[in-house]
Amino acid sequence: MARSISYTRKISEPIDSAFEIISTYKNYKDFIPGCIDSRVISEEGNMQVGQLKFEMFGKSYLIESKNKQSDFKLEIEQIRGPFDSFKGCWSLIEKEKKTEISFNAAFTLPFLLNAVTPDSLINKLSETIIESFIAKLS
């Protein structure tokens, strides 16, 4: 069963500075809870393939994703990792001297994990990650 998350926030940070933080893959370890390493594996034009390493509950997890940048938009697609599928998108828009940041994602968890993971936990974890990005920007 596919699930989705969606958040929008406005901040005072200029759009180009905000996008620089969101699109710099190697800095993700500094503000994604549980992420102990983040690195770019390959880069070509506006496309990066990166890897995130997490340590949670005494286990290590890797996520590899393809990130495509264009006009204050960052599209993310998991290549390898714990999700059956994951596609997300950060998009930034300048409005009334503020930067509006939106994050939307659709994902599918493995069957057993999906069965035991309530939406409230997914929403809380997602909000924590997104708010840590926003805090880094403020």
Image (cartoon, helix red, strand yellow):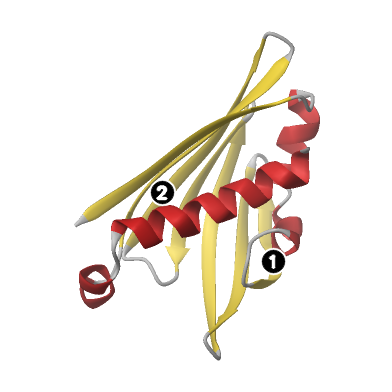
Q: Is residue 101 left or right of residue 7?
A: right
Depicted 37 relative to depicted 31: above or below: below
Residue 134 image offset from top left, x and y in percent: 68, 42
**Upstream in the sequence, badge 1 or badge 2?**
1
Res. 84 visible in picture: yes
From the viewer's side, name the closer residue of 91 and 137. 137
From the viewer's side, name the closer residue of 32 and 47. 32
**Placement of the C terminus among the 4 image quadrants:** top right
Q: Badge 2: how crowded within 10 Å, few (<14), some, or many (20+)? A: some
**Placement of the N terminus among the 4 image quadrants:** bottom left
Q: Amino acid at mark 2?
A: Lys
Q: Is residue 27 left or right of residue 70?
A: right
Q: Residue at x 45, y 45 (%)?
A: 88
Q: Which residue is mark 1?
A: 38
Q: Residue at x 72, y 45 (%)?
A: 135
Q: Badge 1: how crowded within 10 Å, few (<14), some, or many (20+)? A: many
Which quarter of the picture shows residue 38? bottom right
Depicted 69 relative to depicted 129: above or below: above
Q: Amino acid at mark 1?
A: Ser
Residue 59 image offset from top left, x and y in percent: 53, 89
Q: Which residue is mark 2?
A: 87
